[in-house]
Image: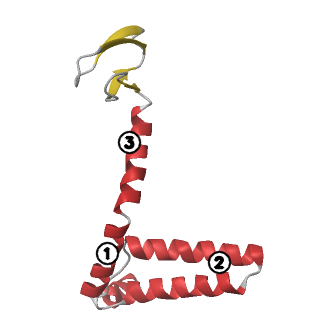
């Protein structure tokens, strides 16, 4: 059975980030249609799911890749903001992040070192912070 599915999917586009987004949007619209008993959300859900499967089974790989690249270009700022927030949250487990009082440069200080004098690498201003 697995071999039949592999042969069937050979030459087809498959799933990508735009396809994942449309599937998630379809599921969210389906849930909203159940909560609000709305025909519009129901139609939106089915359109998103059908379009997602159309993209997954499409043999026009270049056109689907171009659609995905357009999606990635348009959502770059939002995706990079979330990536920065995730990175910052993971660093906050080990470091305190302070801003220099004069130039507003972000400075990482390791946690657990007590009261230390911090020198800004950009403007050389020194200030005391608790780590």
For image coordinates 35% across by 23% down, the residue present is: 100
Quick one: quadrant of the C terminus? Answer: top left
Residue at image mark 2:
30
| Residues marked 1 and 3 touching at CB (< 8 Å) | no
For image coordinates 33% across by 68% down, the residue present is: 72
When the figure is inspected, residue 31 is found, relative to residue 88, above or below; the finding is: below
For image coordinates 66% across by 81% down, the residue present is: 41
Task: Indicate the secondary structure of the residue bearing disc 2.
Answer: helix
Task: Indicate the secondary structure of the residue bearing disc 3.
Answer: helix
**What's the distance in space between the residues labelled 3 and 2, CA to CA?**
32 Å
**What's the distance in space between the residues labelled 1 and 3, CA to CA?**
25 Å
Residue 82 lies left or right of residue 38; in this view the side is: left
Residue at image mark 3:
87
> Which of marks 2 and 3 precedes in the sequence?
2
**What's the distance in space between the residues labelled 2 and 1, CA to CA?**
26 Å
Task: Indicate the secondary structure of the residue bearing disc 1.
Answer: helix
Q: In x, y percent, where is residue 97?
A: 40, 27
**Which residue is more in the foreground, 51 or 9?**
51
Residue at image mark 1:
70
């Amino acid at each position: 059975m697995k071999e039949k599915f592999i042969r069937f999917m050979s030459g087809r586009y498959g799933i990508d980030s735009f396809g994942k987004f449309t599937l998630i949007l379809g599921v969210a619209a389906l849930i909203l249609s159940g909560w609000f008993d709305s025909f519009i959300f129901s139609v939106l859900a089915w359109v998103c799911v059908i379009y997602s499967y159309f993209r997954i089974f499409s043999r026009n790989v270049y056109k689907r890749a171009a659609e995905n690249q357009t999606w990635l270009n348009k959502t770059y700022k939002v995706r990079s903001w979330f990536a920065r927030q995730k990175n910052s949250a993971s660093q906050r487990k080990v470091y305190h992040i302070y801003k220099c009082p004069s130039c507003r440069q972000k400075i990482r200080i390791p946690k657990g070192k007590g009261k230390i004098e911090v020198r800004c690498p950009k403007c050389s201003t020194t200030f005391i912070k608790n780590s």
